[in-house]
Amino acid sequence: MKLNELRDNEGAARKKKRVARGPGSGKGKTAGRGIKGQKSRSGVAINGYEGGQMPLYQRLPKRGFNKPNKKHYAVINLGIIQKFVDAGKLDASATITEDALVASGAVRRKLDGIRVLAKGDVSSKLELSVTGASQAAVDAVAKAGGSLTVAAAVEAAE
């Protein structure tokens, strides 16, 4: 066998379809695109369309649920509260309410209430009154000699 005798196997290489090359090609004039309409123009791909077959995004089941009346709480850590007390922006001797936290700038806005989390250390004896708190935060404040009361009746007042 010589180099000039090398050939593909019969049927292995198919000739490229040359569209719009006259009526004799079988793909002349409109080049197999039909007449007019969006899909006869260049640069068109109809996203999510699968030629009439049910598209993938419709074949897959819907998942999840978003509760329309979900409560959104502003979150603050105990370490931040302690930092504001040390800086003199919060009064540790008085009860620290949600309004006091907003007024001092520790929390931007109340939303549906303020929830206290236990990250950070508490050294001052604090009296806190908020909408929600983690159990670890309640324990940390109690360990420092203070108290953290969670107001459950805030939802009924609104």
Image (cartoon, helix red, strand yellow):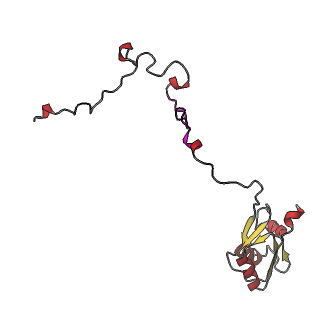
The residue nearer to you, when weighing 53 against 5, is: 53
Snapshot quadrant of residue 105:
bottom right
Outermost residue on the left side: it is: 1
The residue nearer to you, when weighing 108 against 155, is: 155
Q: Residue at x 78, y 70 (%)?
A: 132
The residue nearer to you, when weighing 109 against 91, is: 109
Snapshot quadrant of residue 49:
top right
Position in image of residue 92 (x %, y %) = 81, 79
Q: On the picture, is 9 further left or further right than 18?
A: left
Q: Quadrant of the N terminus?
A: top left
Snapshot quadrant of residue 29:
top left
- Residue 60 vs 70, above or below: the answer is above
Position in image of residue 120 (x %, y %) = 67, 77
Q: Quadrant of the C terminus?
A: bottom right
In the image, residue 42 lies in the stretch drawn in magenta: no
- Residue 67 vs 118, above or below: the answer is above
Stretch of the chain drawn in magenta: 43-57
Q: Residue at x 75, y 64 (%)?
A: 74
Q: On the picture, is 1 further left or further right than 97?
A: left
- Residue 139 vs 73, above or below: the answer is below
Q: Residue at x 84, y 81 (%)?
A: 93
Outermost residue on the right side: it is: 157
Position in image of residue 121 (x %, y %) = 69, 80
SS majority, magenta = loop
Q: On the picture, is 62 further left or further right than 18?
A: right
